[in-house]
Amino acid sequence: MNTQTHRLLGPLLAPLLGACLLAGCGDGRSADDTRTDGKSLQAQEKRAREVADAWHGSAAAAAWSRGYYPLADTTQPPESGWHSEADKQAYETRTIVRRGKLPTTAITQGKVKWRSGSTLSRPLVAPNTAYQSFAHYNSQGPRLTVTGVKLGAMTITTSRGTAAVPAWLFTLDGYDTPLKQVAVTPSKLPKSPIGQVEQGSTGGLRSIARLAGTAADGRSLTVRATHGACDDGPVVNVLETDESIVLSASVTGERSGACTAQMIYENVKVELRQPLADRVVLDALTGRPVPYTEVSGVSPG
């Protein structure tokens, strides 16, 4: 069972550490009803600060600052927009077929270019591999047809800001502008300088499944959090520093008694005091960067 509810997060004052914390409150309950109890919040703050301090000046932070990690969709639909709801549905369900074979390429490297002037060479994926990353189903009903491909570029948000990234430009039957798919692999995630804590401990911390999106102005993130059938949903607190954003996920309104065993995924919008820029987004539970994931899988490593 999946839900797509987006919860806006309101500010909370952190009494002990002076950190900026934002908590979920999107269903009409007051902030006092949705926030975790004081001891749990303090435990989350303490862990978040430990994670931020561990990453500060670490080898992992240095590796992250040099790498290429997408923070937005690596597949982009035609700029001209979809011609019909049927075509839009085909794209959303990835019901995309190809006409004929896709060409091979002798090119093995592509160069990511940031606005700062920095560049990074990354391995290039073959056109057919790129096609398979967004074309999953061949069912009855609406479908899109790929008729050709060529190498070009696309602009996406990355961990180091906006970048021009090599992309395969797939021609779609009936469209003047292509469907774009990033053509290079992300960098390997660095090893975290701090270990993971047990799920449910440390103020009820839970892992964050993935980063689902970044606002164009960098002032908010959407993360995919989890909860069960016997609670009121996920809450995500945030600790911001100059170098990192540490997210602490938990649930609110847990109830005891008989409960069905299920994992429910829910999107939570996290507002930031300052734009994301090149700060690393970390999971307080795992101590690792929160991966960006889309339909085709995890992007950053």
Image: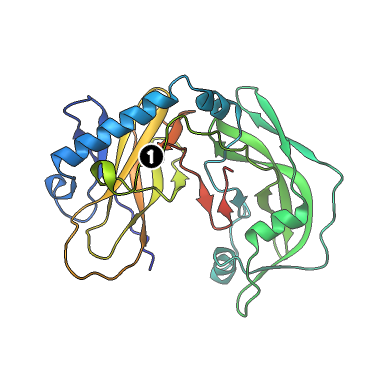
Q: Amino acid at mark 1?
A: Ser
- Residue marked by disc 1: 220
101, above or below 155, in the image:
below
**Quadrant of the rendering where the C terminus is positioned:** top right
Residue 38 x, y percent position in the rendering: 14, 39
Q: Nearer the viewer, residue 58 or 93?
A: 58
In this view, 213 is above or below 47 = below
Secondary structure of the residue carrying numbered label 1: strand
Q: Is residue 258 left or right of residue 89?
A: left
Residue displayed at 87% across by 45% down: 106
Residue 184: percent from the left, percent from the top? 69, 42
Tell me if 37 is positioned left or right of 137 in this view.
left
Residue 157 at what x, y percent from top left? 54, 38
Q: Establish if 43 lies above or below 93.
A: above
Asked if one can make out residue 274 in the rendered structure from this viewpoint, the answer is: no
Query: Farthest residue toward the right?
Result: 106
Quadrant position of residue 98? bottom right
Q: Nearer the viewer, residue 69 or 62?
A: 62
| Residue sitting nearer the eye, 154 or 199 | 199
Left or right side of 17 for 278:
right
**How many numbered badges does the structure rendering display?**
1
